[in-house]
Image (spheres, rainbow, N blue to C red):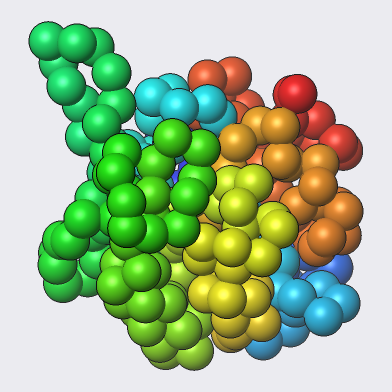
Amino acid sequence: MSEQLVQVVLDRLQFPRGSAADFSSNEPPADGRASPDSRAGPYRAAVLVSGAIGEGKTSAVSFLAEQLVRRGISVDGVLALRILDREAGRTIGYDLIAIRSGYRIPLAREHSPGQKAGRFFLREDALREAERILRNAAVTQSVVILDEVGRLEMTGGGHAPALEAVLAGSALPVLTIRRSLVGQMRDRLGASAVDCVDVVRGELLNGREGGS
């Protein structure tokens, strides 16, 4: 699946959907930047990485970032690394990791303070740092990764301000997202502007697929 995700992103960077690109070459743009013609409506085309908790969304986009860097394509953004209590077999929090710098801070814990998100609380300082990184990446990089978009973001909380900046920027957004929210995000961006790769099925989903 990870290799397919890399190819989907490379295709989006070089051959924006609806553009009159030359499909005879498989090389990414020489300067590592995507064409501005890849915008679709008010937002740029996006790539979604869908799945449930623990199915490998973060691992997939981490692999993607490594492969893009190897190809000389600029990328930045944030990862949400799950913290496990292995003895209890449960998730006890998440840390925020900046892709380019490797900077790491607590993002979500089971106790306050912070924004309530299910049984976790999102730390305001981590959200501010993520927004700073994402806003900068959206206008300076070729690809910007946001891990992840959940119900809170879809209703204006959590990373929502950063998500708006990412979607309106010049970088290609790659968003990890729960399957149940894929249809909602497709509606928001326009289905034709979105590619969705499922981490379990290992395939590119079409139309309103994504699960419930």
Rendered residue at 70%/48% (across/down): 195
Q: Nearer the viewer, residue 111 or 129?
A: 111
Q: Nearer the viewer, residue 21 or 143?
A: 143
Rendered residue at 82%/73% (across/down): 40
Rendered residue at 58%/47% (across/down): 150
Total numbered badges shown on the rendered structure: 0
Q: Nearer the viewer, residue 18 or 151?
A: 151
Q: Measuring from the top left, give residue 15's x and y in whole percent.
A: 67, 66
Q: Measuring from the top left, give residue 17's x and y in whole percent.
A: 78, 64
Q: Measuring from the top left, give residue 185's x and y in whole percent.
A: 76, 52
- Quarter of the rendering occupied by the C terminus: top right
Q: Name, please, the residue furthest toward the front.
A: 112
Side of 18 where 87 appears, left or right: left
In which quadrant of the rendered view does residue 119 lie? top left
Q: Nearer the viewer, residue 111 or 61?
A: 111
Side of 62 where 84 appears, left or right: left
Side of 94 where 141 appears, left or right: right
Rendered residue at 80%/30% (across/down): 209
Q: Is residue 147 visible?
A: yes
In which quadrant of the rendered view does residue 155 lie? bottom right
